[in-house]
Image (cartoon, rainbow, N blue to C red):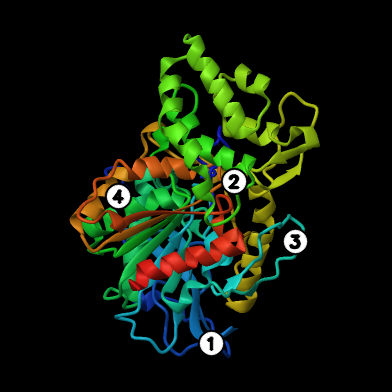
Amino acid sequence: MNVLKSASRLGLILAFGFLFLTPPLHAQDDEAGKPEPQKHESQKPEKPHGSAATAAPNPLPAPSVTSHELQLQGRTLRFKATAGAIRLNDGQSGKPIADLSYVAYELEGTDKAKRPITIAINGGPGASSAWLDLGGLGPWRLPLDGAVPSTAPVTVDNAETWLDFTDLIFLDPPGTGYSRMLADSDEARKHFYSVNGDIEALSVAIRKWLTDNKRLESPKYIVGESYGGFRAPKLAHRLQDNEGIGITGLILISPVLDFGWFETGNNPLSFATRLPSMTAAARGLNGTNGRSALADVEAYARGPYIVDLLHGERDAEAQARIVDKVAGFTGLDKALVKRLGGRIDPRTFARERTRAEGRISSQYDSLATGLDPDPHAASSDHSDPVLDAYKTPLAAAMADITANRLNWPVEARYEILNENVNRQWDWNGRGQAESLSDLKSVLALDPHMHVLIVHGLTDEVTPYFTSALLIDQVAPLGDANRLRLAVYGGGHMVYAKDGSRAALRDDARKLITGE
Protein backbone atom coordinates (compact mmCIF):
# COMPACT_ATOMS: atom_id res chain seq x y z
CA MET A 1 0.00 0.00 0.00
CA ASN A 2 -0.11 2.59 0.00
CA VAL A 3 0.74 5.22 -0.66
CA LEU A 4 1.01 8.77 -1.52
CA LYS A 5 -0.28 10.73 1.47
CA SER A 6 -1.79 13.64 -0.45
CA ALA A 7 -1.38 15.58 -3.64
CA SER A 8 1.19 17.76 -1.95
CA ARG A 9 2.93 14.80 -0.29
CA LEU A 10 2.89 12.42 -3.24
CA GLY A 11 5.96 10.52 -2.14
CA LEU A 12 4.48 9.15 1.12
CA ILE A 13 1.38 7.78 -0.11
CA LEU A 14 3.46 6.63 -1.96
CA ALA A 15 21.88 -6.71 -1.28
CA PHE A 16 22.80 -3.33 -1.23
CA GLY A 17 25.87 -1.69 -2.38
CA PHE A 18 26.83 1.85 -1.72
CA LEU A 19 27.82 2.29 -5.34
CA PHE A 20 30.96 4.45 -5.45
CA LEU A 21 30.58 5.84 -1.95
CA THR A 22 31.26 2.69 0.02
CA PRO A 23 32.04 -0.94 -0.83
CA PRO A 24 29.12 -2.92 -2.23
CA LEU A 25 26.97 -5.05 -0.02
CA HIS A 26 27.47 -8.75 -0.22
CA ALA A 27 24.77 -11.25 0.65
CA GLN A 28 26.94 -13.55 2.76
CA ASP A 29 25.26 -16.69 4.02
CA ASP A 30 27.16 -16.73 7.34
CA GLU A 31 25.71 -20.18 7.94
CA ALA A 32 28.01 -20.97 10.84
CA GLY A 33 27.08 -17.78 12.63
CA LYS A 34 23.31 -18.06 12.32
CA PRO A 35 21.35 -18.52 15.52
CA GLU A 36 19.21 -21.63 15.78
CA PRO A 37 15.54 -21.11 14.90
CA GLN A 38 13.19 -20.73 17.85
CA LYS A 39 11.79 -24.04 19.07
CA HIS A 40 8.12 -24.62 19.59
CA GLU A 41 5.60 -27.38 19.04
CA SER A 42 4.51 -26.47 15.53
CA GLN A 43 7.99 -25.86 14.16
CA LYS A 44 9.24 -27.75 11.13
CA PRO A 45 12.53 -29.63 11.55
CA GLU A 46 14.39 -27.86 8.74
CA LYS A 47 16.46 -24.77 9.37
CA PRO A 48 15.28 -21.62 7.56
CA HIS A 49 17.74 -19.67 5.49
CA GLY A 50 18.27 -15.96 5.07
CA SER A 51 18.39 -15.34 8.83
CA ALA A 52 20.32 -12.69 10.69
CA ALA A 53 23.83 -13.26 12.02
CA THR A 54 24.51 -13.00 15.76
CA ALA A 55 27.46 -10.64 15.43
CA ALA A 56 25.35 -7.61 14.54
CA PRO A 57 24.28 -5.02 17.10
CA ASN A 58 20.57 -4.96 17.90
CA PRO A 59 19.73 -7.97 15.70
CA LEU A 60 16.24 -9.26 15.06
CA PRO A 61 15.26 -12.55 16.72
CA ALA A 62 16.23 -15.91 15.32
CA PRO A 63 13.90 -17.10 12.56
CA SER A 64 10.76 -18.99 13.48
CA VAL A 65 9.04 -21.70 11.43
CA THR A 66 5.49 -22.75 12.20
CA SER A 67 2.92 -25.05 10.58
CA HIS A 68 -0.67 -24.03 9.95
CA GLU A 69 -3.88 -25.32 8.47
CA LEU A 70 -6.51 -23.16 6.83
CA GLN A 71 -10.03 -24.55 6.51
CA LEU A 72 -11.78 -22.77 3.67
CA GLN A 73 -14.91 -23.53 1.72
CA GLY A 74 -14.21 -26.52 -0.49
CA ARG A 75 -10.51 -26.78 0.37
CA THR A 76 -7.92 -27.14 3.11
CA LEU A 77 -4.57 -25.40 2.86
CA ARG A 78 -1.66 -26.74 4.92
CA PHE A 79 1.32 -24.45 4.88
CA LYS A 80 4.59 -23.51 6.52
CA ALA A 81 5.13 -19.95 7.73
CA THR A 82 8.59 -18.48 8.29
CA ALA A 83 9.17 -15.17 10.05
CA GLY A 84 12.71 -13.93 10.03
CA ALA A 85 15.22 -11.46 8.63
CA ILE A 86 17.57 -11.28 5.66
CA ARG A 87 21.00 -9.94 6.57
CA LEU A 88 22.73 -7.50 4.26
CA ASN A 89 26.48 -7.16 4.81
CA ASP A 90 29.22 -4.88 3.57
CA GLY A 91 30.95 -6.61 0.66
CA GLN A 92 34.52 -5.86 1.81
CA SER A 93 34.43 -5.72 5.60
CA GLY A 94 31.60 -8.21 6.07
CA LYS A 95 30.04 -5.90 8.65
CA PRO A 96 26.25 -6.07 8.91
CA ILE A 97 24.42 -3.14 7.36
CA ALA A 98 20.71 -3.99 7.65
CA ASP A 99 18.23 -6.69 8.56
CA LEU A 100 15.18 -6.90 6.30
CA SER A 101 12.27 -8.60 8.03
CA TYR A 102 9.99 -10.90 6.07
CA VAL A 103 7.16 -13.38 6.42
CA ALA A 104 6.99 -16.29 3.97
CA TYR A 105 4.13 -18.74 3.43
CA GLU A 106 4.80 -21.98 1.54
CA LEU A 107 2.18 -24.63 0.78
CA GLU A 108 3.04 -28.11 2.02
CA GLY A 109 3.29 -31.15 -0.24
CA THR A 110 4.30 -29.31 -3.43
CA ASP A 111 7.23 -29.53 -5.82
CA LYS A 112 9.17 -26.38 -4.93
CA ALA A 113 10.98 -26.35 -8.27
CA LYS A 114 7.65 -25.99 -10.10
CA ARG A 115 5.67 -24.11 -7.47
CA PRO A 116 5.44 -20.33 -8.19
CA ILE A 117 6.79 -17.91 -5.61
CA THR A 118 5.49 -14.33 -5.39
CA ILE A 119 7.45 -11.55 -3.68
CA ALA A 120 5.16 -8.82 -2.29
CA ILE A 121 6.44 -5.31 -1.61
CA ASN A 122 4.45 -2.26 -0.57
CA GLY A 123 4.96 1.40 -1.25
CA GLY A 124 5.30 4.74 0.46
CA PRO A 125 8.25 4.96 0.49
CA GLY A 126 7.83 3.95 4.12
CA ALA A 127 4.95 1.45 3.97
CA SER A 128 5.30 -2.10 5.26
CA SER A 129 4.07 -5.26 3.55
CA ALA A 130 1.24 -5.78 6.07
CA TRP A 131 -1.05 -3.82 3.75
CA LEU A 132 -0.81 -6.55 1.11
CA ASP A 133 -0.40 -9.44 3.55
CA LEU A 134 -3.39 -8.75 5.80
CA GLY A 135 -5.26 -6.73 3.20
CA GLY A 136 -5.87 -9.49 0.71
CA LEU A 137 -3.06 -11.87 -0.29
CA GLY A 138 -2.00 -13.76 2.83
CA PRO A 139 -3.73 -16.61 4.67
CA TRP A 140 -5.30 -14.28 7.24
CA ARG A 141 -7.11 -11.05 6.53
CA LEU A 142 -8.11 -8.00 8.54
CA PRO A 143 -11.52 -6.78 7.30
CA LEU A 144 -10.79 -3.20 6.21
CA ASP A 145 -13.99 -1.89 4.65
CA GLY A 146 -15.27 0.66 7.17
CA ALA A 147 -12.32 0.18 9.54
CA VAL A 148 -11.40 2.97 11.98
CA PRO A 149 -8.49 3.30 14.43
CA SER A 150 -10.48 1.61 17.23
CA THR A 151 -11.43 -1.39 15.07
CA ALA A 152 -10.39 -4.57 16.87
CA PRO A 153 -7.32 -6.04 15.14
CA VAL A 154 -8.97 -9.44 14.78
CA THR A 155 -8.15 -11.32 11.57
CA VAL A 156 -10.23 -13.91 9.75
CA ASP A 157 -9.25 -16.79 7.49
CA ASN A 158 -8.83 -15.33 4.03
CA ALA A 159 -10.97 -17.09 1.43
CA GLU A 160 -9.23 -15.01 -1.28
CA THR A 161 -5.67 -15.91 -0.28
CA TRP A 162 -3.26 -16.44 -3.16
CA LEU A 163 -1.71 -19.50 -1.45
CA ASP A 164 -3.81 -21.80 -3.63
CA PHE A 165 -1.67 -20.99 -6.66
CA THR A 166 1.57 -19.40 -5.37
CA ASP A 167 3.82 -19.33 -2.34
CA LEU A 168 4.23 -15.87 -0.86
CA ILE A 169 7.00 -13.81 0.72
CA PHE A 170 6.21 -10.38 2.15
CA LEU A 171 9.35 -8.27 2.35
CA ASP A 172 9.85 -5.05 4.33
CA PRO A 173 12.43 -2.48 3.16
CA PRO A 174 14.58 -0.80 5.83
CA GLY A 175 12.58 1.42 8.16
CA THR A 176 9.32 -0.48 7.59
CA GLY A 177 7.75 -3.37 9.46
CA TYR A 178 10.45 -4.73 11.77
CA SER A 179 13.33 -4.11 9.33
CA ARG A 180 16.16 -2.10 10.78
CA MET A 181 19.42 -0.42 9.93
CA LEU A 182 22.49 -1.94 11.59
CA ALA A 183 25.07 0.46 10.17
CA ASP A 184 25.10 3.79 11.99
CA SER A 185 26.57 5.96 9.22
CA ASP A 186 24.55 8.71 7.54
CA GLU A 187 25.82 7.48 4.17
CA ALA A 188 24.29 4.06 4.73
CA ARG A 189 20.92 5.54 5.61
CA LYS A 190 21.00 7.93 2.66
CA HIS A 191 21.76 5.09 0.30
CA PHE A 192 18.95 2.87 1.56
CA TYR A 193 16.51 5.78 1.44
CA SER A 194 16.97 6.53 -2.24
CA VAL A 195 15.40 5.38 -5.49
CA ASN A 196 18.46 3.50 -6.74
CA GLY A 197 19.78 2.28 -3.40
CA ASP A 198 16.37 0.91 -2.45
CA ILE A 199 16.18 -1.17 -5.64
CA GLU A 200 19.73 -2.40 -5.17
CA ALA A 201 19.02 -3.52 -1.61
CA LEU A 202 15.74 -5.25 -2.34
CA SER A 203 17.24 -7.04 -5.35
CA VAL A 204 20.07 -8.54 -3.32
CA ALA A 205 17.68 -9.48 -0.51
CA ILE A 206 15.38 -11.24 -2.97
CA ARG A 207 18.27 -13.08 -4.61
CA LYS A 208 19.60 -14.18 -1.24
CA TRP A 209 16.25 -15.49 -0.02
CA LEU A 210 15.61 -17.41 -3.25
CA THR A 211 19.09 -18.92 -3.17
CA ASP A 212 19.06 -19.86 0.51
CA ASN A 213 15.61 -21.38 0.29
CA LYS A 214 16.37 -23.32 -2.92
CA ARG A 215 13.70 -21.52 -4.95
CA LEU A 216 15.81 -20.43 -7.93
CA GLU A 217 14.03 -22.92 -10.21
CA SER A 218 10.56 -21.71 -9.21
CA PRO A 219 8.56 -19.40 -11.49
CA LYS A 220 9.01 -16.00 -9.84
CA TYR A 221 6.56 -13.11 -9.65
CA ILE A 222 6.60 -9.68 -8.02
CA VAL A 223 3.53 -7.88 -6.74
CA GLY A 224 3.93 -4.25 -5.74
CA GLU A 225 1.42 -1.73 -4.45
CA SER A 226 1.60 2.05 -5.04
CA TYR A 227 5.31 2.96 -4.80
CA GLY A 228 5.80 -0.81 -4.71
CA GLY A 229 4.28 -0.78 -8.19
CA PHE A 230 6.95 1.76 -9.16
CA ARG A 231 9.57 -0.53 -7.63
CA ALA A 232 8.47 -3.76 -9.33
CA PRO A 233 9.62 -3.05 -12.94
CA LYS A 234 12.93 -1.70 -11.65
CA LEU A 235 13.38 -4.78 -9.47
CA ALA A 236 12.67 -7.11 -12.38
CA HIS A 237 15.16 -5.16 -14.52
CA ARG A 238 17.92 -5.21 -11.91
CA LEU A 239 17.33 -8.83 -10.90
CA GLN A 240 17.80 -10.05 -14.47
CA ASP A 241 20.76 -7.76 -15.21
CA ASN A 242 22.70 -7.83 -11.93
CA GLU A 243 21.55 -10.76 -9.81
CA GLY A 244 20.98 -13.56 -12.33
CA ILE A 245 17.28 -13.84 -11.44
CA GLY A 246 14.56 -13.91 -14.11
CA ILE A 247 11.05 -12.73 -13.23
CA THR A 248 8.11 -14.39 -14.96
CA GLY A 249 5.46 -11.77 -14.28
CA LEU A 250 4.51 -8.57 -12.47
CA ILE A 251 1.27 -7.52 -10.76
CA LEU A 252 1.18 -3.79 -10.10
CA ILE A 253 -1.55 -2.57 -7.74
CA SER A 254 -2.34 1.17 -7.88
CA PRO A 255 1.14 1.90 -9.25
CA VAL A 256 2.97 5.09 -10.15
CA LEU A 257 4.79 4.40 -13.40
CA ASP A 258 5.91 7.96 -14.09
CA PHE A 259 5.92 10.63 -11.38
CA GLY A 260 6.07 13.37 -14.00
CA TRP A 261 2.42 12.68 -14.81
CA PHE A 262 1.39 13.33 -11.19
CA GLU A 263 2.92 16.75 -10.70
CA THR A 264 0.15 19.35 -10.45
CA GLY A 265 0.49 23.03 -11.28
CA ASN A 266 1.63 23.57 -14.84
CA ASN A 267 1.07 20.01 -16.04
CA PRO A 268 -2.37 19.66 -17.70
CA LEU A 269 -2.02 15.87 -17.79
CA SER A 270 -2.40 15.66 -14.02
CA PHE A 271 -5.88 17.20 -14.22
CA ALA A 272 -7.01 15.17 -17.23
CA THR A 273 -5.94 11.83 -15.76
CA ARG A 274 -7.84 12.39 -12.50
CA LEU A 275 -11.10 13.58 -14.04
CA PRO A 276 -12.51 10.08 -14.76
CA SER A 277 -11.98 8.95 -11.15
CA MET A 278 -13.65 12.12 -9.87
CA THR A 279 -16.56 11.45 -12.20
CA ALA A 280 -16.77 7.86 -10.95
CA ALA A 281 -17.16 9.20 -7.41
CA ALA A 282 -19.75 11.75 -8.49
CA ARG A 283 -21.73 8.96 -10.15
CA GLY A 284 -21.32 6.60 -7.17
CA LEU A 285 -19.69 3.85 -9.24
CA ASN A 286 -18.44 1.01 -7.06
CA GLY A 287 -18.72 -2.18 -9.09
CA THR A 288 -16.05 -4.17 -10.89
CA ASN A 289 -17.59 -3.13 -14.25
CA GLY A 290 -17.92 0.55 -13.36
CA ARG A 291 -15.44 1.72 -15.97
CA SER A 292 -17.96 0.95 -18.71
CA ALA A 293 -20.04 3.87 -17.42
CA LEU A 294 -17.14 6.30 -17.87
CA ALA A 295 -16.65 6.15 -21.63
CA ASP A 296 -17.91 9.71 -22.06
CA VAL A 297 -15.56 11.31 -19.54
CA GLU A 298 -12.60 9.24 -20.74
CA ALA A 299 -13.18 10.44 -24.29
CA TYR A 300 -13.42 14.03 -23.08
CA ALA A 301 -10.33 13.79 -20.86
CA ARG A 302 -8.30 12.14 -23.62
CA GLY A 303 -9.25 14.73 -26.23
CA PRO A 304 -11.19 18.00 -25.86
CA TYR A 305 -10.16 18.59 -22.23
CA ILE A 306 -6.44 18.28 -22.99
CA VAL A 307 -6.79 20.47 -26.07
CA ASP A 308 -8.63 23.22 -24.20
CA LEU A 309 -6.17 23.05 -21.30
CA LEU A 310 -3.36 23.56 -23.79
CA HIS A 311 -5.16 26.58 -25.23
CA GLY A 312 -4.56 28.08 -21.79
CA GLU A 313 -6.30 30.53 -19.52
CA ARG A 314 -6.11 33.40 -22.01
CA ASP A 315 -8.59 31.63 -24.29
CA ALA A 316 -11.96 32.62 -22.82
CA GLU A 317 -13.96 30.26 -25.01
CA ALA A 318 -11.78 27.28 -24.07
CA GLN A 319 -12.09 28.20 -20.41
CA ALA A 320 -15.87 28.40 -20.65
CA ARG A 321 -16.03 24.96 -22.26
CA ILE A 322 -13.78 23.50 -19.55
CA VAL A 323 -15.86 24.93 -16.71
CA ASP A 324 -19.15 23.62 -18.13
CA LYS A 325 -17.84 20.11 -18.75
CA VAL A 326 -15.81 19.70 -15.55
CA ALA A 327 -18.65 20.96 -13.34
CA GLY A 328 -21.02 18.57 -15.07
CA PHE A 329 -18.73 15.57 -14.68
CA THR A 330 -17.63 16.19 -11.07
CA GLY A 331 -20.86 17.59 -9.63
CA LEU A 332 -18.89 20.43 -8.03
CA ASP A 333 -20.33 23.93 -7.77
CA LYS A 334 -19.84 25.72 -11.09
CA ALA A 335 -18.62 28.90 -9.40
CA LEU A 336 -15.89 26.89 -7.64
CA VAL A 337 -14.90 25.15 -10.87
CA LYS A 338 -14.71 28.51 -12.64
CA ARG A 339 -12.58 29.98 -9.87
CA LEU A 340 -10.18 27.04 -10.27
CA GLY A 341 -10.13 27.29 -14.05
CA GLY A 342 -11.55 23.79 -14.42
CA ARG A 343 -8.37 22.36 -12.88
CA ILE A 344 -9.43 20.28 -9.89
CA ASP A 345 -6.72 18.86 -7.66
CA PRO A 346 -7.38 15.82 -5.40
CA ARG A 347 -7.23 17.75 -2.14
CA THR A 348 -9.84 20.26 -3.30
CA PHE A 349 -12.10 17.49 -4.56
CA ALA A 350 -11.82 15.63 -1.26
CA ARG A 351 -12.79 18.76 0.69
CA GLU A 352 -15.46 20.24 -1.53
CA ARG A 353 -17.40 17.22 -2.80
CA THR A 354 -19.13 16.62 0.54
CA ARG A 355 -18.40 19.92 2.28
CA ALA A 356 -22.09 20.82 2.58
CA GLU A 357 -22.57 17.74 4.79
CA GLY A 358 -19.57 18.62 6.97
CA ARG A 359 -17.66 15.63 5.66
CA ILE A 360 -14.46 15.02 3.72
CA SER A 361 -13.72 12.39 1.12
CA SER A 362 -10.68 10.15 1.12
CA GLN A 363 -8.15 10.74 -1.63
CA TYR A 364 -7.59 6.98 -1.54
CA ASP A 365 -11.26 6.25 -2.20
CA SER A 366 -13.48 9.21 -2.99
CA LEU A 367 -16.62 7.27 -2.04
CA ALA A 368 -15.35 6.88 1.53
CA THR A 369 -16.00 9.92 3.72
CA GLY A 370 -15.33 11.04 7.27
CA LEU A 371 -16.23 13.96 9.49
CA ASP A 372 -14.41 17.21 8.72
CA PRO A 373 -12.74 18.47 11.92
CA ASP A 374 -12.84 22.06 10.62
CA PRO A 375 -15.95 22.24 8.43
CA HIS A 376 -16.08 26.06 8.31
CA ALA A 377 -12.36 26.72 7.77
CA ALA A 378 -11.09 27.98 4.45
CA SER A 379 -8.76 25.01 4.35
CA SER A 380 -8.42 21.90 6.48
CA ASP A 381 -5.39 19.73 7.20
CA HIS A 382 -7.48 16.67 7.93
CA SER A 383 -6.64 13.03 8.42
CA ASP A 384 -7.54 10.79 5.50
CA PRO A 385 -10.62 8.68 6.35
CA VAL A 386 -9.12 5.62 4.64
CA LEU A 387 -5.33 5.70 4.99
CA ASP A 388 -5.21 7.07 8.53
CA ALA A 389 -8.13 4.88 9.61
CA TYR A 390 -6.68 1.62 8.30
CA LYS A 391 -3.10 1.89 9.49
CA THR A 392 -3.72 1.56 13.25
CA PRO A 393 -5.64 -1.75 13.24
CA LEU A 394 -3.35 -3.12 10.53
CA ALA A 395 -0.23 -2.43 12.60
CA ALA A 396 -1.77 -3.99 15.69
CA ALA A 397 -2.97 -7.06 13.80
CA MET A 398 0.42 -7.65 12.19
CA ALA A 399 2.26 -7.28 15.49
CA ASP A 400 -0.13 -9.76 17.10
CA ILE A 401 0.20 -12.33 14.31
CA THR A 402 3.98 -12.04 14.18
CA ALA A 403 4.42 -12.49 17.93
CA ASN A 404 1.67 -14.93 18.81
CA ARG A 405 0.78 -16.90 15.68
CA LEU A 406 4.20 -17.00 14.02
CA ASN A 407 6.09 -17.08 17.33
CA TRP A 408 8.50 -14.30 16.31
CA PRO A 409 8.21 -11.60 18.98
CA VAL A 410 10.15 -8.38 18.34
CA GLU A 411 10.69 -5.77 21.02
CA ALA A 412 9.93 -2.83 18.76
CA ARG A 413 7.01 -0.99 17.21
CA TYR A 414 5.74 -2.41 13.95
CA GLU A 415 6.24 0.39 11.40
CA ILE A 416 3.13 0.26 9.24
CA LEU A 417 3.71 3.64 7.56
CA ASN A 418 6.96 5.37 8.47
CA GLU A 419 6.78 9.04 7.50
CA ASN A 420 10.41 9.59 8.56
CA VAL A 421 11.51 7.30 5.73
CA ASN A 422 9.42 9.30 3.29
CA ARG A 423 10.73 12.65 4.48
CA GLN A 424 14.33 11.47 4.10
CA TRP A 425 13.83 9.86 0.68
CA ASP A 426 16.29 10.93 -2.00
CA TRP A 427 14.31 11.13 -5.23
CA ASN A 428 17.10 12.66 -7.29
CA GLY A 429 14.34 14.76 -8.83
CA ARG A 430 10.93 13.18 -8.19
CA GLY A 431 9.40 14.64 -11.34
CA GLN A 432 11.93 12.65 -13.37
CA ALA A 433 11.43 9.36 -11.49
CA GLU A 434 9.78 6.76 -13.72
CA SER A 435 9.77 2.99 -14.17
CA LEU A 436 7.88 2.73 -17.45
CA SER A 437 11.21 2.47 -19.29
CA ASP A 438 12.16 -0.50 -17.09
CA LEU A 439 8.79 -2.09 -17.79
CA LYS A 440 9.27 -1.75 -21.53
CA SER A 441 12.78 -3.20 -21.30
CA VAL A 442 11.85 -6.34 -19.36
CA LEU A 443 8.82 -6.98 -21.58
CA ALA A 444 10.88 -6.58 -24.74
CA LEU A 445 13.69 -8.84 -23.58
CA ASP A 446 11.51 -11.68 -22.26
CA PRO A 447 8.52 -12.58 -24.46
CA HIS A 448 7.21 -14.90 -21.73
CA MET A 449 6.74 -12.12 -19.18
CA HIS A 450 3.19 -10.92 -18.46
CA VAL A 451 2.16 -7.82 -16.51
CA LEU A 452 -1.16 -7.04 -14.85
CA ILE A 453 -1.82 -3.44 -13.74
CA VAL A 454 -4.70 -3.02 -11.29
CA HIS A 455 -6.50 0.13 -10.15
CA GLY A 456 -9.59 1.17 -8.21
CA LEU A 457 -12.16 3.39 -9.93
CA THR A 458 -12.31 6.06 -7.24
CA ASP A 459 -8.64 6.37 -6.33
CA GLU A 460 -7.44 9.98 -6.67
CA VAL A 461 -3.90 9.24 -5.45
CA THR A 462 -2.88 7.04 -8.37
CA PRO A 463 -5.86 7.30 -10.77
CA TYR A 464 -6.45 4.45 -13.18
CA PHE A 465 -6.61 6.72 -16.24
CA THR A 466 -2.94 7.65 -15.83
CA SER A 467 -1.93 4.02 -16.26
CA ALA A 468 -4.42 3.63 -19.11
CA LEU A 469 -2.76 6.44 -21.06
CA LEU A 470 0.76 5.24 -20.22
CA ILE A 471 -0.03 1.70 -21.37
CA ASP A 472 -1.08 3.21 -24.69
CA GLN A 473 2.49 4.49 -25.02
CA VAL A 474 3.89 0.92 -24.90
CA ALA A 475 4.29 -0.89 -28.21
CA PRO A 476 2.47 -4.26 -28.52
CA LEU A 477 5.83 -6.10 -28.22
CA GLY A 478 4.46 -9.14 -29.98
CA ASP A 479 1.24 -9.55 -28.01
CA ALA A 480 -0.58 -6.57 -26.52
CA ASN A 481 -2.30 -8.88 -23.98
CA ARG A 482 0.99 -9.33 -22.17
CA LEU A 483 0.40 -5.91 -20.59
CA ARG A 484 -3.14 -5.59 -19.29
CA LEU A 485 -5.10 -3.08 -17.20
CA ALA A 486 -7.89 -4.15 -14.84
CA VAL A 487 -10.07 -1.58 -13.08
CA TYR A 488 -12.24 -2.60 -10.14
CA GLY A 489 -14.60 -0.83 -7.80
CA GLY A 490 -13.01 0.82 -4.80
CA GLY A 491 -9.95 2.93 -4.27
CA HIS A 492 -6.20 2.74 -3.79
CA MET A 493 -6.40 -0.38 -1.60
CA VAL A 494 -8.67 -2.26 -4.01
CA TYR A 495 -8.52 -5.38 -1.83
CA ALA A 496 -10.52 -3.62 0.90
CA LYS A 497 -13.72 -4.28 -1.07
CA ASP A 498 -14.96 -7.89 -1.12
CA GLY A 499 -15.84 -8.00 -4.82
CA SER A 500 -12.64 -6.28 -5.89
CA ARG A 501 -10.48 -8.52 -3.70
CA ALA A 502 -12.03 -11.58 -5.34
CA ALA A 503 -11.56 -10.08 -8.82
CA LEU A 504 -7.92 -9.27 -8.05
CA ARG A 505 -7.30 -12.83 -6.89
CA ASP A 506 -8.93 -14.28 -9.99
CA ASP A 507 -6.90 -12.09 -12.34
CA ALA A 508 -3.67 -12.87 -10.45
CA ARG A 509 -4.41 -16.60 -10.60
CA LYS A 510 -4.91 -16.43 -14.37
CA LEU A 511 -1.63 -14.58 -14.85
CA ILE A 512 0.38 -16.94 -12.62
CA THR A 513 -1.16 -20.26 -13.68
CA GLY A 514 -1.86 -19.32 -17.30
CA GLU A 515 -5.36 -20.79 -16.98
Q: Which numbered mark, 4 or 3, is in the foreground of this view? A: 4
Q: Which residue is mark 4?
A: 439
Question: How many residues crowd around disc 3 within 10 Å: few (fewer than 14), some, or many (20 or more)?
Answer: some
The circle on residue 364 is 2
Q: Which residue is mark 1?
A: 76
Disc nearer the start of the sequence (3/2) = 3
Residue at horizontal 32%, vertical 62%? 249
Given contact means CB atoms under 8 Å apart, are the residues at marks 3 and 1 in contact? no
Residue 434 at x, y = what percent? 35, 40
- Tag 3: residue type? Thr
Task: Establish if 50 lies above or below 224.
Answer: below
Instruction: Work out whether residue 335 can be spotted.
Output: yes
Q: Which numbered mark, 3 or 1, is in the foreground of this view? A: 1
Residue 510 at x, y = what percent? 38, 69
Disc nearer the start of the sequence (4/3) = 3
Report whether 219 appears left or right of 121: left
Task: Give the distance between the C-alpha atoms of the residues marked 3 and 2, in whole angstroms.
Answer: 19 Å
Of residues 480 and 202, the one drawn nearer to the viewer in this rendering: 480
Report whether 200 appears left or right of 63: left
Task: Establish if 150 lies above or below 434.
Answer: below
- Tag 2: residue type? Tyr
